[in-house]
Amino acid sequence: MADRTFLDWPFFEPRHRDFADGIAAFADDLGDLAPGHADVDASCREIARRLGAGGWTANAVGDALDVRTLCLAREILAYRGGLADFAFAMQGLGSGPITLFGTNDQKRDWLPRVARGEAIAAFALSEPEAGSDVAALKTTATPDGGDFVIAGEKTWISNGGIADFYCTFARTGEAPGAKGLSCFLIPAETPGLTVAERIETSAPHPLARLRFEDARVPASARIGGAGEGFKVAMSVLDIFRSTVGAAALGFARRALDEASGRAATRRLFGGTLGDLQMVQAMLADMATAVDAAALMVYRAAWTKDAGAPRVTRESAMAKLHATETAQRVVDQAVQIMGGHGVVLGNPVERLYRDVRALRIYEGASEVQKVVIARQHLAAYAERANAKGVDGKGERG
Ligand code: COS
């Protein structure tokens, strides 16, 4: 039973507590889903359908995204199983460009279907030579007689192969680097778009490399303005990065609960595992880490919901801290579980595989540090300029 005392923190309103109750009951009903590689696509589709039919995905799609609700959903689903969290999150991330920057027609054509779980969304940004360095991406979108022709390759695309559409970032060349990208809504059945490779990962989920060979889309497929693709991508990531932290938090809470159960019941040396001070020290570190991660995640979410135009710094901190922390908590849980912790199918063994990718996807920990440091230095320079340009104000 997950700790729910954090829901009394001032970040939350009564509607968040109701939401948490509802989605926890849904997740319990869904069960501990951990399919293997062979049936992961079908399981993912089925979970997306049930999340949609239950009305949960509607919270990740549409005009008024409440980031605290997204984070609660991810935390609670991740506690039960990585694939349920993945299916929910990717519907939101994949349709995020349309939600934030889409035209009325794009929204009308796709968002209700995604919300109901009848269409599956994907976010196609990374390339073989451009993952962390988004501004280096090479896929091109060339205007041709009122259309755009897309050519290039995307990789590490979640929902690749099962998605109904891909929000795809390509170079349109208005300016060099980050200022010359645009985003396009590309239906999966577009001629010239193929799945070049399925990628199997340690924690199974649908993932693929895509190839665009002169895939033609109408000009109306562009999401956001010409040359605004980088801004579209970053704005979507600003929202969803804190939710990655929330998923990590769900994994960490589950690991802590599994370890606590073991510590309370496993007998040795005339007492329980939890009587041993070295185990107590681990549990203390894990419990503190979980609360610290929750504070950072819900601080970022609340800041966005309270109307901040950008939460680049807060969401990068939340993702960095929560994912790094969760990795340690899960590892400590494996240690407390002993041999059981590495037995295939044990919840902690599964968490060990589930948690690892979160330190890499949607901006690796190292990228988050770059983002945080840039934001920090820019804020410092602003404060220093405001106070110190005439040499009289204090610095720091
Ligand atoms: N929101 C809105 N605008 C943003 C932004 C944000 N979060 N971050 C940057 N921008 C703007 C900048 O303000 C800048 O515009 P101005 O020149 O008008 O100020 C422009 O976009 C370019 O920004 P920057 O110079 O920082 O670009 P870089 O190429 O140096 O960006 C990082 C570097 C590392 C920040 C970026 O490439 C990044 O976040 N990479 C990780 C991406 C990622 O998560 N990849 C995983 C795949 S997605 S699953």
Image: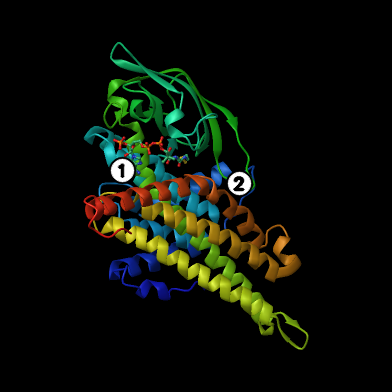
Q: Is residue 73 above or below residue 153?
A: below
Residue that carries the numbered disc 1 in the rendered image: 112
- Residue 24, x across and y down, in percent: 44, 65
Q: Can see residue 116?
A: no
Which residue in the rendered view is the most extreme toward the bottom?
270
Residue at x 35% of width, y 75% of height: 8
Q: Which image quarter has ligand 1?
A: top left
Residue at x 38% of width, y 63% of height: 298
Q: Is residue 244 above or below residue 216?
A: below
Residue that carries the numbered disc 2 in the rendered image: 204
Q: Nearer the viewer, residue 358 or 180?
A: 180
- Residue 79, x across and y down, in percent: 52, 63
**Which quadrant: the C terminus?**
bottom left
Which residue in the rendered view is the most extreme toward the right?
269
Which residue in the rendered view is the most extreme toward the front?
391
| Amino acid on which disc 1 is placed | Pro
- Residue 366, x across and y down, in percent: 52, 47
Q: How is the model colour-coded?
A: rainbow
Cβ–Cβ below 8 Å for labels 2 and 1?
A: no
Q: Nearer the viewer, residue 296 or 66?
A: 296
* SS assignment at label 1: helix
